[in-house]
Image (cartoon, rainbow, N blue to C red):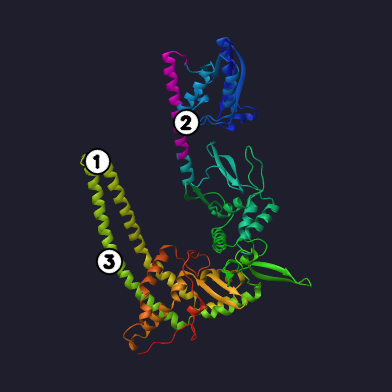
């Protein structure tokens, strides 16, 4: 490294924050960089020194010192004797005090002197003071500008505008309003916009998987928006899935996690977008990774011997005929020693059609269960209302404690650490109480609504399934079952979703019949009521954990696990409805 600092030569550093500034006016460097260069060279002439090198960062923010040309300049100073570093203004070099201090230390270590064309920052005490003040002003300007930008972005989002880079299918454009002011907005991309509209309409039909949809969209010309430094390229599968989930395509602007109604023209109606989300949810909930072999039972049927998932396999016979089978993935991977043989798909389909009558309750039983469960819910509602009053009183007491705690702290009656600990405890209790109050207020109506939908869904379930299309069968299966276990002999067991597990539980069936036949018996069957409290607690808890309608096509089904029921548990030798109790 050379340490001779007697050479009278200078380097100049130029910078603009954005590419737009660097290219403004159609020139190679815009307007700012040539103006900075002229001022720096004029300053060098005044000092009587020559400019040996210049370093230009085009489109680099000064909020970070990690700028390529700045770092190259600092390396240059280490290796080459330089007397002066000239900038047009200090904020060209740095916009925060820490970076300013570090850069100045590096410049001084090289033996050079920093010179500003517009600020007097020499080595005198007043020059050092001016340097410190100007550095602080630059940092304030940067921080204040960031705050104003965030404020403007929030206001833009609230009014329906698009903040930042437009998603695929749109492009950022500049328009002029009636007063001649420039407006930055978005417009539908004439190339990608129609393809995105087709993507949503096509997937909403429910007969194609995401991977194949992406292949078709790519063939039609769908690719990413080009950037200042990046060309267009085909979309990745993960990015394409994010686009299908993005609410922007139904007219919603999302900013900082909050949704606002946008004024851009969406490629999908809300109905189509919701349908796409429903299909994505259903296929994701079933754990289905669709590729070439698609079937409506994928993700629902499992091996009756080892419990692993059944997958689709197409095998060709001796004469070239193609036979579709379900095979156990455990056996295929040789992971668990399963010996289950392949089962023809049409055989599995027939087994499930034949099984549906087993979960078809009679209309009389449905009416009995409705009346009985509504009575029980009314009882639990009364209990919840009593708890609600108690919880409200406890909340008022805690709020008073919190106010007294603050007053004691302000009066220096308790130390800060004790105040923090008590305040944390009170806030935790208040949050817990508020969750309980809010939940108990909504539980009853939610349970009743979903009960009616579930019971209505089971009225003609076997006939409806037999006549349904494959897509409707998929929805019915995923609404009713978590898993259906199958082997060559037929269905060996099932796991029901929470609500149907409750409705078809023997204890509920027995209790419902006793409730209707109360005139012929004085006591309900002990085996029925032993577990009813827990069953209803489970039902309410399930509602709190997003229990949703299984009767409507556009609603989801909970995915959390519970124990399953075999067909022996569901249906005895007498059928679904057990023998009527008698005295």
For image coordinates 49% across by 76% down, the residue present is 458
Q: Which residue is mark 1?
A: 415
Q: Position of residue 496 (x, y in %)?
A: 49, 71
- Between circles 1 and 2, the one closer to the viewer is 1
Q: Which residue is mark 2?
A: 142
- Between circles 1 and 3, the one closer to the viewer is 1
| Left or right: 406 in relation to 310 | left
For image coordinates 47% across by 31% down, the residue present is 142
| Left or right: 231 in relation to 392 | right
Of mark 2 and mark 3, the one earlier in the sequence is 2
Of mark 1 and mark 2, the one earlier in the sequence is 2
Q: Secondary structure at mark 2?
A: helix
Q: Which residues are magenta?
A: 121-150
- The residues tagged by marks 2 and 3 sit, at their Cα atoms, a distance apart of 57 Å
Q: Which residue is mark 3?
A: 386
- Between circles 2 and 3, the one closer to the viewer is 3
């Amino acid at each position: 490294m050379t340490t001779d600092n007697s050479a009278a030569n200078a380097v100049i550093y130029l910078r603009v924050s954005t590419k737009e500034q660097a290219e403004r006016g159609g020139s190679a460097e815009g307007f700012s960089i040539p103006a900075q260069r002229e001022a720096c060279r004029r300053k060098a002439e005044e000092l009587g020194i020559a400019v040996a090198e210049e370093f230009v960062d085009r489109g680099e923010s000064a909020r970070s010192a990690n700028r390529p040309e700045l770092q190259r300049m600092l390396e240059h100073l280490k290796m080459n004797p330089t007397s002066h570093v000239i900038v047009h203004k200090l904020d060209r070099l740095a916009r925060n005090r820490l970076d300013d201090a570090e850069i100045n230390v590096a410049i001084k270590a090289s033996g050079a002197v920093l010179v500003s064309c517009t600020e007097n920052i020499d080595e005198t005490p007043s020059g050092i003071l001016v340097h410190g003040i100007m550095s602080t002003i630059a940092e304030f300007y940067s921080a204040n500008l960031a705050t104003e930008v965030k404020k403007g972005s929030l206001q833009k989002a609230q009014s329906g505008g698009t903040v930042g880079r437009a998603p695929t299918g749109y492009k950022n454009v500049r328009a002029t309003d009636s007063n001649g002011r420039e407006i930055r907005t978005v417009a539908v991309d004439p190339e990608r916009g129609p393809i995105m509209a087709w993507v949503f309409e096509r997937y909403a039909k429910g007969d194609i998987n995401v991977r194949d949809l992406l292949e078709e969209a790519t063939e039609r010309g769908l690719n990413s928006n080009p950037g200042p430094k990046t060309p267009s390229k085909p979309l990745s599968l993960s990015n394409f899935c994010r686009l299908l989930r993005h609410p922007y395509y139904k007219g919603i602007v999302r900013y900082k996690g909050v949704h606002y109604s946008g004024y851009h023209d969406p490629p999908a109606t809300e109905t189509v977008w919701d349908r796409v989300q429903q299909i994505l949810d259903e296929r994701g909930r079933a754990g289905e990774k669709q590729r070439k072999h698609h079937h409506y039972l994928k993700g629902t049927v499992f091996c009756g011997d080892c419990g692993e998932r059944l997958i689709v396999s197409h095998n060709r016979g001796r004469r070239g005929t193609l036979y579709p089978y379900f095979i156990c993935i455990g056996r295929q991977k040789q992971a668990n020693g399963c010996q289950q043989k392949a089962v023809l798909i049409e055989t599995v389909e027939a087994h499930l059609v034949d099984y549906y009558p087993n979960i078809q309750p009679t209309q009389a039983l449905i009416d009995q269960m409705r009346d009985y469960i509504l009575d029980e819910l009314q009882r639990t509602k009364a209990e919840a209302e009593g708890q609600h009053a108690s919880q409200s009183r406890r909340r008022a007491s805690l709020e008073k404690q919190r106010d007294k705690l603050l007053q004691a702290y302000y009066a220096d009656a308790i130390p800060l650490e004790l105040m923090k600990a008590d305040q944390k405890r009170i806030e935790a209790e208040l949050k817990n109480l508020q969750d309980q109050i809010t939940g108990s207020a909504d539980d009853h109506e939610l349970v009743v609504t979903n009960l009616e939908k579930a019971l209505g869904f089971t009225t003609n379930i076997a006939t409806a399934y037999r006549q349904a299309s494959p897509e409707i069968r998929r929805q019915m299966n995923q609404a009713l079952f978590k898993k259906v276990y199958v082997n060559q002999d037929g269905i060996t067991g099932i796991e029901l979703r929470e609500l149907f597990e409750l409705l078809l539980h023997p204890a509920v069936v027995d209790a419902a019949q006793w409730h209707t036949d109360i005139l012929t018996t004085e006591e309900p069957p002990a085996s029925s009521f032993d577990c009813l409290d827990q069953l209803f607690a489970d039902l309410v808890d399930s509602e709190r954990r997003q229990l949703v309608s299984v009767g409507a096509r556009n609603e989801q089904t909970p995915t959390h696990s519970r124990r399953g029921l075999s067909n022996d548990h569901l249906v005895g030798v007498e059928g679904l409805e057990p023998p009527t109790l008698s005295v």
